[in-house]
Image (cartoon, rainbow, N blue to C red):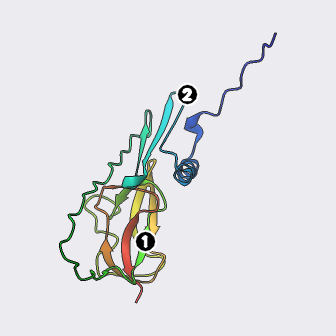
Amino acid sequence: MNTKKPTEPKDVSGLDRSDIERLIEVIHDKGIQEFELEQGGMKLRIVSNRAAAATQIVYAAEPPAVHHAPAAVAAAPAAAAPAAAPVDETAGLKKVTSPMVGTFYRAPSPGAKNFAEIGDKVTEDSVLCIIEAMKLMNEIKAEVRGTVRKVLVENGQPVEYGQALFLVDPN
């Protein structure tokens, strides 16, 4: 007669931000559409919609829920005649991407001056924004020298790992 008890897995609440980011990367890399883990009153659920390039993470306990709405995809009507090739306005611009999932903020606090505006000259160490992830404020630096040409995310909007935040002209 076997009287051994199964060992309890590590409590999900023991996961840190880097563990969750690595988990999200593996889930995306493997093409897993949905993942759920529940331990010790904590529930982690990751739903991936690769066609809409969106991920949803829902927490049942602290930290508060972060929801990412899938992007709408509209069907383009068929063109009757071939049109001239559109000019790529982003050619030659460097993307500054999000290193994590979180909430995008352009300023250090509400009502404060934005870290960077369109037309500002930046260096590799210039802070462009902050991303709040699991109640931690993370400064995002330009990592490229140049001029800010576009801000691609609205203040307070949720962002994904690898999502483009700014376009910087390195010239």
**Residue 21, image x, y percentages:** 53, 52
Q: Are marks 1 and 2 in contact (CB under 8 Å)?
A: no
Residue appearing at x 39%, y 54% in the figure: 51
Q: Is residue 97 above or below residue 149?
A: above
| Residue lying furthest bottom | 171
For label 1, the SS is strand
Which residue is denoted by mark 2 in the rendering?
40
Which residue is denoted by mark 1 in the rendering?
96
Q: Earlier in the sequence, mark 1 or mark 2?
A: 2
**Residue 39, image x, y percentages:** 56, 30
Type of amino acid at the residue the image marks with label 1: Val
**Residue 154, image x, y percentages:** 28, 61
Q: Which mark is residue 66?
A: none
Q: Is residue 7 above or below residue 112?
A: above
Q: Is residue 106 above or below residue 93?
A: above
1 vs 2, front mark: 1
Residue appearing at x 71%, y 26% in the figure: 7
Between residue 138 and residue 6, name the one nearer to us.
6
Between residue 111 and residue 20, name the one nearer to us.
20
